[in-house]
Amino acid sequence: MSFFHRETQGIRVIAQPFYVAEHSDPGDERYVFAYRMRIENVGDQAAQLVWRHWYIHDSASGESEVEGEGVVGEQPLIGPGDVHEYQSFCVLEGPEGSMEGYYEFRRPDGGVFRADIPRFLLRTFSA
């Protein structure tokens, strides 16, 4: 499995995508990809994840964007040295694509910043 990572302002984001064949139906142009996200606070200040913004590229249907509060219904406060992990999924019409974007964080002092989500590939095969 491939890992993709990026670090921004003391927040390291690691993505691990994988194809979910048992929930996919290529004959119906339905390709399900899951991804594990690991968000590590390698800085010296706490940060609360308050917003997400995804750019999704689908080889069949083109570009789309998804955004919203937190991740999987949570807005975790991640202290220095702490980690937050979650898993989610994306359904594409084509057999490959990619995702990237950013999380918006708020510091205890009210400061706001974006942490980049690295571009990661969604493929039905291993590269």
Image (cartoon, rainbow, N blue to C red):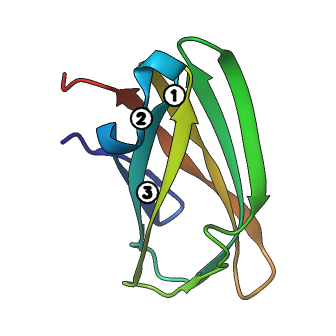
Element type where label 1 sits in the image: loop
- Which label is found at residue 30? 1
Amino acid on which the number 1 mark rests in the picture:
Arg
Looking at the rendered image, the quarter that the N terminus falls into is top left
Q: Which residue is mark 2?
A: 24
Q: Earlier in the sequence, mark 3 or mark 1?
A: 3
Task: Evaluate if marks 1 and 2 touch, with contact meaning CB atoms under 8 Å apart.
Answer: yes
Q: In the rendered structure, which amino acid carries the disc numbered 3?
A: Val
Picture layout, residue 6 above or below residue 50: above
User: Residue 98: percent from the left, percent from the top?
Assistant: 48, 28
> Percent from the top left, x then y, of residue 13?
43, 57
> Which residue reaches farthest front?
27
Residue in the image at 55% along x and 28% along y: 92
Mark 3, residue position: 13
Q: Which mark is residue 12?
A: none
Is 99 placed left or right of 38 in the picture? right
x, y percentage for residue 51? 74, 63
* Residue under the point 44% across and 85% down: 80
Q: Residue at x 23, y 23 (%)?
A: 125
**In which quadrant of the rendered image does the C terminus lie?**
top left
The amino acid type, in three-letter code, at marker 2 is Ser
Q: Are marks 3 and 2 in contact (CB under 8 Å)?
A: no
Please give the name of the residue rendered at 72% of the width and 88% of the height, measured from the top-left corner: 108
